[in-house]
Amino acid sequence: MPDGAQPVLDVRGLKTVFRTRGGLIHAVNDVSFSLRPGELLGVVGESGSGKSVTMMSLLGLLPSPPAQNAGGQVMFEGKDLLKVSASELRAVRGGRIGFIFQDPMTSLNPVFTVGYQIMEPLRKHMGLDKERARKRAAELLDLVGIPDAARRLKDYPHQFSGGMRQRVMIAIALACDPKVLIADEPTTALDVTIQAQILELVRDLRQKLGMAIVWITHDLGVIAGIADRVMVMYGGQVVEMAPVKELFARPRHPYTQALLQTIPSLHGPRGDRLRTIDGQPPILRKAPSACPFMSRCRHAVPMCGLENPARRTLTPGHDVACHRAEELAIVREVAHG
Ligand SMILES: Nc1ncnc2c1ncn2[C@@H]1O[C@H](COP(=O)(O)OP(=O)(O)O)[C@@H](O)[C@H]1O
Ligand SMILES: [Mg+2]
């Protein structure tokens, strides 16, 4: 898609804090990204890096208190979602922006039939009557590859397997023809074969429906096969952003490089020990005045402790927030010939 295309979602300088007994937690620090029409943006980073809070924050899904927006704007269809009324935001959510939560068991309500749960948003957001909603619900189940769709509307969530429940979640998220789909680790709980099927399905649906997708995962390996661009988060910040091929070929942030080392499929035959990154993610008690990755970075120099590196563009479309990015890139190029 053309670089100049008007973004469907444009997030600028998003900041979110939690007011806790122990003080402020700076969970999201100045996060910016835009989503182009039809693109799939992968968001990766270890657990606790701020992926979920970023997305929930822009959809107004975090309970406040303790969460509080501390700045930024989220432009969608000409409006700043951080400024619209609660009812307007509810209409966008589950309507023009679809959302899939992490755990299918907790997000499908066990006491209602699957049909009811798909028909609900259709009646609420699209104003369909019961019969039309039922017809559309069956079409949606069929679209996400659930056999015998019309009959299965009467079933309850527990009558579906994990993979099939996840498909139902996708059907609900797609119900109102969203322009944007935000999927937060939707396949983590599933076995590898089913994960692959769901990814295939999403790729296929994107083609058919032309929506833009934000796909959150802690697994860079998952992203490799499906994303157009990747945003890498660490310590509540975007540390790197690049087209997927570029990111895998020329990772510039030491954190991204370390993440790449942890993907078993990219490093030799099965049975190879999965590497993890030494050290712990930061606890975000204060707004970072140093690089948040410093304590775990093998390239850290004193400068890294003095100033949180600003995100900047290294080559067109490739952003990184590391003081030493250029210097390390040269070293890497020499080493790799
Ligand atoms: N309700 C909460 N109260 C305080 N801190 C929270 C709350 N929810 C999330 N956080 C903090 O926000 C940070 C980012 O969390 P999250 O976005 O869930 O990470 P990820 O999705 O990348 O695993 C973490 O440091 C987490 O401890
Ligand atoms: Mg999360």
Image (cartoon, grey):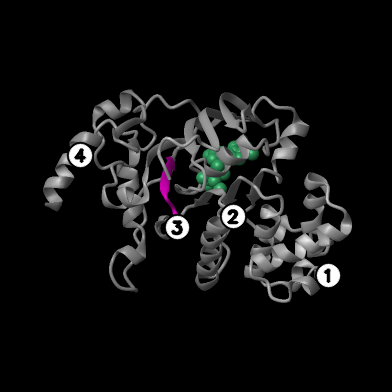
The residue under the point 34% across, 59% down is 275
Q: Amino acid at mark 4?
A: Leu
Q: Is residue 278 above or below residue 321?
A: below
Label 1, on which residue? 154
Q: CA distance from mark 3 to mark 1?
A: 33 Å
* Mark 1 or mark 4: whose residue is earlier in sequence: 1
* Residue depth check, mark 1 versus mark 2: number of the one nearer the observer: 2
* Mark 3 or mark 1: whose residue is earlier in sequence: 1
Q: CA distance from mark 3 to mark 2?
A: 16 Å
Q: CA distance from mark 4 to mark 2?
A: 41 Å
Measured as percent of width and height from the top left, residue 3 is found at: 40, 38
* Mark 3 or mark 4: whose residue is earlier in sequence: 3
Q: CA distance from mark 3 to mark 4?
A: 28 Å
* Residue depth check, mark 3 versus mark 4: number of the one nearer the observer: 3
The residue under the point 72% across, 65% down is 139
Q: Which residues are magenta?
A: 227-233
